[in-house]
Image: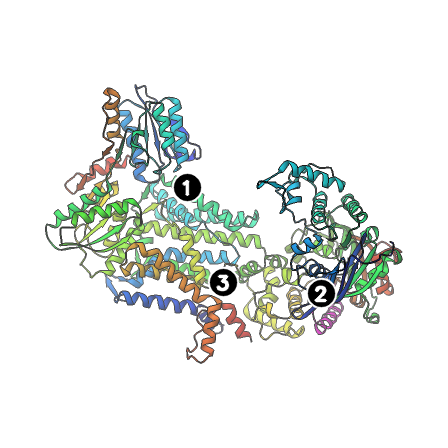
Amino acid sequence: MISQTTPSVFKRVLPQLVILAVVLACNLAVFPGFFALSVHDGRVFGNLVDVLNRGAPVALLCIGMTLVIATRGIDLSVGAVMAIAGAVAASVLAGGQGWGTALLGALAAGLLCGLWNGVLVAVLRIQPIVATLVLMVAGRGIAQLITEGTILTFLDPGMIRLGAGTVLGLPTPIWIWIGLGALVITVVRRSALGMLIEAIGINEAASRLAGINSRVLLICVYGVTGFCAALAGVIVAADIKGADANNAGLWLELDAILAVVIGGNSLLGGRFSILASLLGALIIQSVNAFILLSGLPPEFNLIIKAVLILAILVIQSPKVGHALYMLRAGGLPLGGRTKARSPLTSKEEKAQ
Amino acid sequence: MSVPIRPLLHARGISKFFPGAVALDAVELKLNPGEVHALLGENGAGKSTLIKCLTGAYRRDGGTVTLDGQDVSPASTNEAQALGIGTVYQEVNLLPNLTVAENLFLGRQMTRFGLVRRRAMNARARAVLEDYGLSIDPAEPLTSYSVAVQQVVAIARAVEMSGKVLILDEPTASLDRDEVQLVFGVIRRLKARGLAIVFVTHFLDQVFEICDRATILRNGRVVGERLLEAVRPDDIVTLMLGRQLEARVQARRSGPGGEVLVELEGLGRRGMLEPVSLSIRAGEVVGLAGLLGSGRTELATLLFGAVAADSGTVRKRGRALRLARPRDAIAARFALCPEDRKTHGIVADLSVRDNILLALQARQGWMRPVPRARVNEIAEHYRRALDIRAASLDMPIRLLSGGNQQKALLARWLATRPDLLILDEPTRGIDVGAHAEIIALIERLREEGMALLIASSELEELVAYSSRVVVLRDRRQVGALEGSRITPDNIIGAIAAQTPQTPQEVPA
Amino acid sequence: MKLKATLLAGAAVLLPVLAQAGDLTVGFSQIGSESGWRAAETTVTKQQAKERGLTLKFADAQQKQENQIKALRGFIAQGVDAILLAPVVATGWDQVLEEARDAEIPVILLDRTVDAPQELYLTAVTSDLVHEGAVAGQWLVDAEAGEDCRIVELQGTTGSSPALDRKKGFEQAIADHPNLKIVRSQTGDFTRSQGKVVMESFLKAEAPGSICALYAHNDDMAVGAIQAIKEAGLQPGKDIKIVSIDGVPDAHLAIAHGEMNATIELTPNMAGPALDALEAYLKDGTAPPKWIQTESRLFTAKDDNMAIYEEKKTLGY
């Protein structure tokens, strides 16, 4: 069974792997030591580790975001939920509780935020972009109320380890996002959840008539997204040993959506790949690393990012994909590269 | 009606082709001034395509249209309006937030020095609307009035802007009886003013009440033009539904089936379906006959819980069921293949395999996935049993032909092993081969003891497989036929209902 | 207090904070509470009023100019003796300032200036952002005393005036010292987390041990960078000297722990000089200069940073 599915999964994420390789190669070009790794005090250092570590918040966000987008929705509130979760964790610690309680409190708060979004979308039938905009705007205010406008700092070593500690030589956030990603992918694909979510995203009316409980599923999906955002919020807070309600997760919802899109998932819902989204998050982080290492003045940051992202999206567009395919068919020996073709076209071909 | 000298609008040999289909095949339509002309036909007969060709929404592929003796070929609805052809659709497409007067004059507001002359416009609007028998305040927002009044405003706007030909596309579909009379009053005034009016509707009694003449379309062809004074409703229904296959009646046995499986008692919903009572036995096919909009799809929808009924009860083997959602119906082992396969049936981008599995998996819940080996077994089984032709079960279902999609949907429901299978237009839009296979499958399922409720506009089909036929008209149950009384003629008679063939009540 | 003010969002609600009997009543229109420093400024202003026996009417504008204008009109209608205004934007004040002048109520600007004719306000009390940068630069010049030093810079939000001016002042101060060189400069968006992330990349991009000093445009970024330096196995404050601006409590704490070397205070006490000038003006009509520059005080390990930390913590940073 695994041998049956592995090649198709590989085929699905091939474009993302190729893009990631290209971006990493660009990094290597501007900074020859990019791939170098070293070990101090049992801790591995290197730019690759940084990409994996700094990509953690967006990677965590895009796990949930992929599911939400698969249902034809979107969640703009994840950045604000991060701020809320960080604020809750810090205030629980400030109240003298242990880090375990703080973590649970933060995750519960995130889950609650997600369920709130889910109820607005699934029960009250408010358009997802509007429903989650409410919490996007209000959420940061809630977080500021919790921290009373300050950066609420803490010194609990257990909590700090979640963001800045290491496990087996690698930063904890890397293990957290890879672990949660693997868990969600396994649950979604080993259970029927993935198929049912895709069915809702493609045709909710037909799904309802087929007996799918779309309401409960939608609420759960937004709940998962809130949970992921909370975990990201805890990591960001733990990383700087403080909850910064004004800045934690600011604009990260857009990076998360971008990661999902770079992962080749359609904003119109339907078929999805969390693995591809996670690669998308790493691609974004690699672009960020490129900007920092390039040494160019910060005025260029946004332009470089925009140009690189645009290039990635253009290469992924069906038109360009088709042109590349024709080029290859014209005799260019590009081997088995199916770069930048949408998953559906490759599926169709397989079916022929 | 007096014999007119020359038709106001004469369309001849109108053809329209869509990729792979002939939508209109040399259609002729003659509209006389001062006459209300009904355009009739079942879904897909070509009514709306013809209207769109006349109003410039579509470009015709052949034929001529003369208006007042002049050849015209409008390239847009605006151009058609300027020529004198106005259209009003079922859904009022005015701007609800604007006032009545603004809607009436939208796009041609009375202005002076670039400013809208609101007072003058309101006065003019009041005068215009009084001509239509409406004395309302035109300065009020449109939404403060009923749908019927809005419909009249839409008619007034269309007439004011065009003035020769008025096309009404199901203007009464969402109106109640009194409101229909309001609109009819307006139509009679316009008729007296010498307009040529096209009236499209599915309500046959309204046709006989307001129209003078009718053109009947079937499968993109004109099958008749009739002066309504001279015909009976039966004839019109016969023309609309057609009778190609006379003799397949012998395939049917009148065996009453087994135990009563499902009983409906007064099942209905306001504005959708008046209470219906009927019972379905195991091993029996109950057919639902009626024109489009008669309530046959609505009955299927209510019974499956896709829309909650507000009256009546449904019992299965004597136990009352609560059917608020499709999940409830599925739990009671009901299944429904809906009429609109694309929007309510298939999940286009999912694989054929997932589509087949969907209902079974949804019933089991996401936490208990059907094991992959079992999934393959089920999908393969139905691929062979129903002869679903797909290069691979992994391909998206949208790439299959209509017939194969329908078979996959049947497989989806058969995989749940239903006791009652509800099929709404199971053979619409599929090729001849698949058509025959689906009819054969229905026979087989019935023989295996399943209860089936099938809504169809194909009379021969209903006759071929039904043990009983329930006839609906105007969202009401109007009769039932059993055994040897099930013939196309009798069904048509019951639908037209001038002389009800079987006035008996359906056994509860 | 702040919590309550936040809850009463929307309208510019006037909250009489100190209803002590005093000779003078002063209205204070604050921008909001978007940062710790802003909160501290509010606290210090209230303290200053209390010490001087003034009645302070406080209005939180929730980041909206319209709320500030409403608050100012409210103060004018109540006939206060003077108005302190921390303007949220620079433009659009002419009319309401004229109304205040017509009512003969002096207006003093705190922390930021406005684009309006000078006669419409009594004076403006602000810090000099360029000067702050220059103090930081001069400290590093003195600390290095001619030794070669490769400096990395954490800029504020790209294009913001504090980022531009603090960069400019620092560069001016080190311009004549070729031993000091900025080798990397990148934005950290004034936030702790970006400060940490960018510092991490600086440490990777430069040869190990080659960075001698960090200049951060605010303390928050410096605090984030300190963590990055520690995680890289280096000692902040020793292996890499750190100077930044603002003087928030956590910076004093870091200096007290020897993890940071210097911070230049952006004082939250704008109200002190403002009220001094006001009292002088009301007493005998002494017109203050149109701009009162607050002191940009340098704090280093020589100060009792622990005590300052404890004291500042109470201000609401």
Along the viewing direction, whichever of B331 and C228 lies nearer the viewer: C228
Q: Quadrant of residue B152?
A: top right
| Residue in the image at 49% along x and 56% along y | A68
- Chain letter of the residue beneath label 1 in the structure image: A
CB within 8 Å, label 1 to label 2: no
Which circle marks residue B426 in the picture? 2
Q: Is residue A77 magenta?
A: no
Point out the stretch of residues depicted in magenta: B425-451
Label 3 and label 2: CA atoms lie apart by 32 Å
- Chain letter of the residue beneath label 2 in the structure image: B
Dot 1 corresponds to which residue?
Answer: A141
- Same chain letter for marks 1 and 2: no
Helix, strand or loop under label 1: helix
Which circle marks residue B449 in the picture? none
> Is residue C213 placed above or below C89 in the rendered structure?
below
- In the picture, which quadrant includes the C terminus of chain C? top left
Label 1 and label 2: CA atoms lie apart by 55 Å
- Chain letter of the residue beneath label 3 in the structure image: A
Question: Is residue A222 visible in this depiction of the protein?
Answer: yes
Q: Position of residue C178 (x, y in %)?
A: 13, 54
